Amino acid sequence: MVLGLLTDPPRKFLFHSAEQQPEAIPFPLLPQMLRIADKYNLSVNIVDALNSHLFAHIDTQSLRVYGLACQYGLPGIADAASKRLHSPSLELYSLEEISVIPTAEDYHKLLRLQKLRKKRLEELLEEEAIFPHGYGECWTHKDYTRDRWKEARQSV
């Protein structure tokens, strides 16, 4: 595999998901390829290309991408992956699934980020008016609609 990476390096992609580019390196191969690139200190071009392939799997493998990004010191990719880990909540993942996160510190950061994002979303919802500046307000149903909006915000 090392020889393959050196003689035929992957090309760097500028896309956002593996579904958009079917020629992305399949996710099961990426951990081993990243390990080899790190172990043998392969060129920056090869590492950047592998990182772009890793980024392509954020939508479908968010937790595993987060774990690899933390392991290999890729804060930008880790941040992007963490943004897609808002649901389900981390406590709902199995121990096997969570074990892809390399350190307790990385897991703790993700927990705190998830909690902070949830809190901020709740604050945004609480502040959001159903009829900003009266736009779209129906005089006949405005009280009923406001009550339903209040209930909906609280339930979320």
Image (spheres, rainbow, N blue to C red):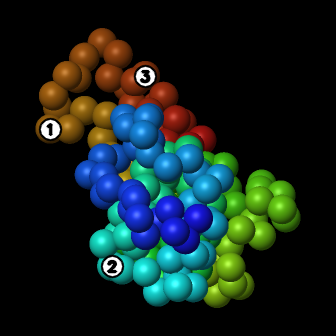
Sequence order check: which comes first, mark 2 or mark 3? Answer: 2
State how far apart marks 1 and 3 are (Cα). 18 Å
Q: Residue at x 59, y 65 (%)?
A: 1
The tag earlier along the polypeptide, 1 or 2, is 2
Label 3, secondary structure: give it.
helix
Residue drawn at the location 26% of the way across and 51% of the way down: 14
Q: What amino acid is at disc 1? A: His
Residue 26 showing in the rendered view: yes
Residue sticking out furthest to the right: 95
Contact between labelled residues 3 and 2, with CB atoms less than 8 Å apart: no
Question: 10 Å neighbourhood of mark 2: few (<14), some, or many (≥20)?
Answer: few
Q: Which mark is residue 44?
A: 2
User: Measuring 30% from the left and 72% from the top, which residue is drawn there?
Assistant: 45
Dot 1 or dot 3, earlier in sequence:
1
Residue 71 badge: none
Q: Residue at x 64, y 87 (%)?
A: 105
**Which label number is shown at residue 144?**
3
Q: Which dot marks residue 133?
A: 1
- Between marks 1 and 3 in the image, the one whose residue lies nearer the viewer: 1
Locate the C terminus by quadrant: top right
Q: Where residue 19 appears, x then y in whole percent?
A: 44, 35
Q: Categorize mark 1 by other alpha carbons within 10 Å: few (<14), some (14-19), many (20+).
A: few
Query: Label 3 near label 1: C-beta < 8 Å?
Result: no
Q: Which is nearer the eye, 129 or 32?
A: 32
| Residue 116: percent from left, percent from top | 50, 70
x and y, in percent, of residue 95 in the image: 85, 64
